Amino acid sequence: MSTLQLSLIVIGLLILAAVMAYNAWVTRQSTSRKAAQREITTPASADNSQRIEPVLDGSDGEGVAPSLEAGDTVPPLPTAPQADKRLRLDPLIDVIAPLALDAVVSGDAVLAALPRSRRVGTKPFAVEGLNTATDEWEVPRAGQRYQALQAGVQLANRAGALNDIEFSEYVVKTQAFADVLGATPEFPDMREEVARARELDQFASTHDAQLGFMLRARRAAWSPGYVTQSAARLGFVPGALPGRMVLPGEVDSAPILSLQFDTQAALAEDPEQSALREVSLSLDVAHVARSERPYQRMREAAAELATAMDGVVTDDNGQPLAQELMDRIGADLEGLYDALDAHDLSAGSPQARRLFS
């Protein structure tokens, strides 16, 4: 065999090896990134039924995203804490009608007389009692005694302002409740309350902000388990719905950020075979106190997830979010926080959470 023939054979073998290596690389890149194969356990006492609910420089660089190795330590996935959802009537955002009583009534009697529906149209309806023992207003409880009652309906929420029909329904419902207990309600003027509702709704409409980032895969898609483990490293915990995770607050128990991916992928028989190309990260501004630094933590979480998962943070249209734009949004949010504070509707307060719901 001549030297030329031997050289051609060696070159052919090298080319074949290069092609095989390239095909293996392409296959690996087109396969969804999957979670590390290990058992993730939660404390035995955890009750799952009680679960609640950018790369900022806009670069498209081709950095290699790290994958989860079998030896990595992934924290257990606790469940999100539930916020206190008990209603507190407030003259700022509620129509309130006092109910005069001839005598002290028991909490059991009040509970038995409450209407089945706790809504008036699209607005929450509630009754509170003045506890004879604590001398404080509270949601009626069995075994307690009350010297006075009051019924209220919310003036506005994201469904709009209280209207004439809803106010009339509120009066009818309250009167029927009062008749059962022998109480006498005192209703405010409908015209004044409806006008107040419109004014509050106008303010809420111009000061409502819900921010959202999209985290999109640069190359390889992600499996739901890979997304879950990556988010868990940053403190996210499972939410109430499949495909949703939340980041609990440091000051308050309520979640401050929400991470969402395709529900169908999360419910698939074998979720690890699902391929996700994007996940969303959202912040409901009025629901989170400024002291939690929600926007800063949203940016940090987005940037860290983008780095860990080889993704890029974009807007809803797929445009990368630049640092300058993110800074401007932050400055606008400070003005929004100031406006809410000035109207006694500070972000994260019970009143703000009810109004912007």
Image (tube, grey):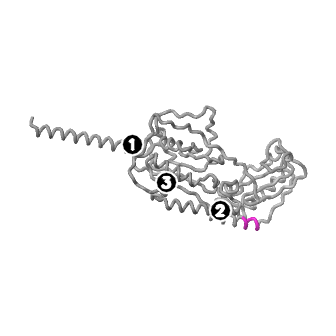
Dominant secondary structure, magenta: helix
Location of residue 106 by image quarter: top right
Q: Residues within 10 Å of mark 3 (few under 14, many from 20)?
A: many
Cβ atoms under marks 3 and 2 closer than 8 Å: no
Viewer-proximal residue among 162 and 46: 46
Question: Percent from the top left, x then y, of residue 320?
Answer: 45, 57
- Any mark on residue 54, and which? 3
Question: SS of the residue at dot 3?
Answer: loop
Closest to the camera, between mark 1 and mark 2, is 2
Q: Is residue 24 left or right of residue 167?
A: left
- Any mark on residue 31, and which? 1
Question: Percent from the top left, x then y, of residue 346?
Answer: 68, 58
- What amino acid type is highlighted by mark number 1? Thr
Residue at (80, 51) in percent of width and height: 137
Residue at (53, 51) in percent of width and height: 300
Q: CA distance from mark 3 to mark 2?
A: 25 Å
Q: Is residue 157 left or right of residue 265?
A: right
- What amino acid type is highlighted by mark number 3? Pro
Residue range highlighted in magenta:
191-196
Name the residue that disc number 2 marks. Answer: 338
Question: SS of the residue at dot 2?
Answer: helix
Question: SS of the residue at dot 1?
Answer: loop
Residue at (67, 59) in percent of width and height: 157
Question: Percent from the top left, x then y, of residue 286?
Answer: 63, 57
Q: CA distance from mark 3 to mark 1?
A: 24 Å
Residue at (49, 54) in percent of width and height: 54
